[in-house]
Amino acid sequence: MQKIKSIEALEAHYGDPIERALWKEITYLNDHYRAFIEASPFLILATHGENGLDCSPRGDPAGFVRVVDEHCLQIPDRRGNNRLDSLRNIVHNPKVGLIFLVPNVGETIRVSGTAQILVDQALCESFSVQGKAASSVISIQVEKAFFQCQKAIARSGLWLTEHYVERSDLPSVGEMVKVFAEMNNKEFSAEEYDKNFPEHLKKTIY
């Protein structure tokens, strides 16, 4: 099995990058990148800390990410399960990466930079939804931003309704939780969990 073990071997295998792929990388958020970010209701946050790598989904109505200026954006952190994987990583290592998605749009925006966790009450309340303030705000100093072409989205057919999967074709959340409950010698009803979850979600989403 042949393996690539050096940057030189990697570059020799793939060849030179397309020139315009280098042009699009900038150290700030221009008006076009800002428009994409403000239209995005969903992003993926990548972090790295003492417990390793983590990728976390973040979502709210479009515009939930605040572009403070061309060098700073802010993301509200909502209530969750308090694992705090991403936040623990940021405390240990503030370097982060983001991918912003916009429904029905093939291109994505990639941003990387340095993050800090802010808990100022007025700031958290400024991100309120349904009367619930953000638990904290992740503020990111932008160091690199560029758009990714639509090839990955086009190949996956992500936004095509004919590619949608019926939820019932996959294990339910209750079924997945039950496996781990049993591993920890806990009694757990998957059926009861799945039955109650829609109402639980309504009460706890914010």
Image (spheres, helix red, strand yellow):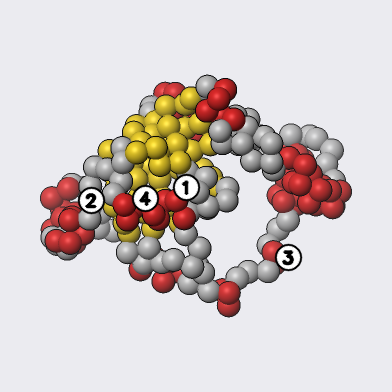
Q: Position of residue 138 (x, y in %)?
A: 47, 32
Residue in the foreground of this view, choosing between 6 and 93: 93
Disc 1 to disc 2, how far (Cα)?
19 Å
Question: In this picture, is 123 found above or below 27?
Answer: above
Q: Are marks 2 and 4 in contact (CB under 8 Å)?
A: no
**What residue is pinned by disc 4?**
34
Q: Position of residue 55 (x, y in %)?
A: 48, 43
What is the number of the mark on residue 105? none
Q: Residue at x 13, y 50 (%)?
A: 8
Q: What residue type is disc 3 on?
A: Ser
Q: Position of residue 152 (x, y in %)?
A: 39, 65
Quarter holding the N terminus is bottom left
Question: In this picture, is 160 found above or below 118?
Answer: below
- Which of label 1 and label 3 is nearer to you? 1
Q: What residue type is disc 2 on?
A: Glu
Question: Of the residues under marks 2 and 4, which one precedes in the sequence?
Answer: 2
**What residue is pinned by disc 3?**
168
Disc 1 to disc 3, how far (Cα)?
25 Å
- Which of label 1 and label 4 is nearer to you? 4
